[in-house]
Amino acid sequence: MEIIENEFLYLVNLWNEYKVLFGNENNLNILNKNCGDCFHTIQHSMNNDMILSLNRLLDPSKQHKNTNLVLESLLNKTSDSKKRKELEDKLEKIRDLRDNSNLKEIRNQRLAHSDITTRNKDGNFIVILIEYDAVDNILHGMSDFLNNINSIVFGTYVEYLDLINVTSCQDLVDALDK
């Protein structure tokens, strides 16, 4: 559970830093003015890492012969069939949020694989930005799912989305603005 929690916290931190740097028009103008090409590369890398990390947590727990350390693998933390069904439903809703956004398609056709039809249509190098609302909703769903697991296993609640306080990226933007 700890490894999955750490992966999720990394994801929350990455997303918060991404939003500070690239989700604010004023900050974006400052970054572009100072070294736009460098920050475009950073944005592209963070964007891709976000998509891959988010999708990886939502992968099935078993693929071929491999067992994945993913959210679904936490379902075995409860033997209560009613609670397990509730958790399965929550996980399915999170996957639906992902599937109804562009996140799974970007991962499967642009990042994890080089889908020839997509590449021929879009060109060799295209940055497709993630949908902010979709990521926020998915992260909230994941946080809720993890808290349900925590409640079952440890009897605790963790406010995952408030654990990460991002100031370093704003400090960077502020320093560049001087």
Image (tube, grey):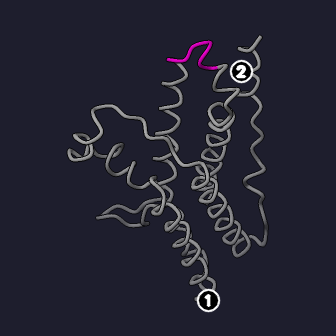
Residue 33 part of the magenta segment: yes
- The residue drawn where x is 21% and y is 47% is 117
Q: Which segment did they paint magenta?
A: 31-37
Which is more foreground, mark 1 or mark 2?
A: 2
Q: Nearer the viewer, residue 155 or 92?
A: 92
Crowd tier of the residue under label 2, counting other residues whose Cα lies within 10 Å: few below 14, some 14–19, many 20 or above: few
Q: Label 2 is placed on what type of residue? A: Leu
Residue 94 image label: none
Amino acid type indicated by mark 1:
Lys
Is 90 situated left or right of 99 in this image?
A: right
Above or below 28: residue 127: below
User: Is 152 situated above or below 38?
Assistant: below
How crowded pointer 1 is (Cα within 10 Å; few <14, some 14-19, many 20+) is rated as few
Where residue 137 sits in the image (x, y, percent)?
63, 59
| Quadrant location, the N terminus | bottom right
Residue 158 figure quarter: bottom right
| Distance in Å between CA atoms under marks 1 and 2 | 48 Å
* Residue nearest the viewer, comparing 31 with 175: 31
Percent of width and height locating residue 20: 69, 34
Query: Residue beneath label 2, please?
Result: 172
Counting from the top left corner in percent of width and height, residue 130 is at 51, 45
| Mark 1, residue position | 82
Near-viewer residue (50 or 30):
30
Question: Which mark is first along the chain, 2 or 1?
Answer: 1
The answer to whether residue 113 is left or right of residue 73 is left
172 displayed left or right of 108: right
Number of numbered tags placed on the structure image: 2
Q: Quadrant of the C terminus?
A: top right
